[in-house]
Image (cartoon, helix red, strand yellow):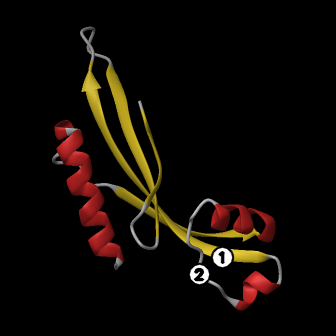
Amino acid sequence: MDKDDIIKKIKEKVVKENPEFKDVEPIVKEEVLEIPGEIKEKMKKMGKEIKETSQANQGFEKKKIKTITFKRFAVAEDGAKIPIVLRITVDEKGNILKESGN
């Protein structure tokens, strides 16, 4: 699944669950994490798939993730603008690793 497909899939999910984010264009941040070998083994036991590379033999595994952030503002009764943020972290296959928001 390429980057555009992942973002499209996440946008559809967000709008379905939170219609107020319909016209919000997300900010996408990509990064590569190095996962220590012992954590990699625990993840395998939990059923999480991690691609094997030569890095794995050195005790670290590189994993690409994307953090997709949706941000909009609501207006309170007193006129104050309140930021509303929804952040979703996905792996390179588009699987949701973490979701947080206010």
Q: Nearer the viewer, mark 2 or mark 1?
A: 2
Q: Secondary structure at mark 1?
A: strand
Q: Tell whether label 1 touches label 2 (CB within 8 Å).
A: no
Q: Residue furthest top?
A: 78
Q: Position of residue 77 (x, y in %)?
A: 24, 9
In the image, 73 versus 31, the foreground residue is 31
Q: Which residue is mark 1?
A: 62
The answer to whether 32 appears left or right of 60 in the picture is left
Q: Is residue 65 above or below residue 83?
A: below
Name the residue type under label 2: Lys
What distance separates the C-alpha of mark 2 from that of mark 1? 9 Å
Residue 58 lies, with reference to residue 21, above or below; the image says: below
- Residue 18 lies, in percent from the top left, at 23, 38
Residue 38 x, y percent position in the rendering: 80, 65
Marks 2 and 1, the one that precedes in the sequence: 2
Is the residue 14 above or below the residue 38 in the image?
Answer: above
- 67 with respect to 11 (left or right): right
Q: How many marks?
A: 2
Q: Residue at x 60, y 75 (%)?
A: 50
Quadrant (top left/top right/bottom left/bottom right) for the N terminus: bottom left
Question: Which of the 4 quarters of the picture holds residue 32?
Answer: bottom right
Residue type of the residue flagged with mark 1: Lys
Helix, strand or loop for disc 2 = loop
Task: Look at mark 2 in the image and give the residue it sits on.
Answer: 51
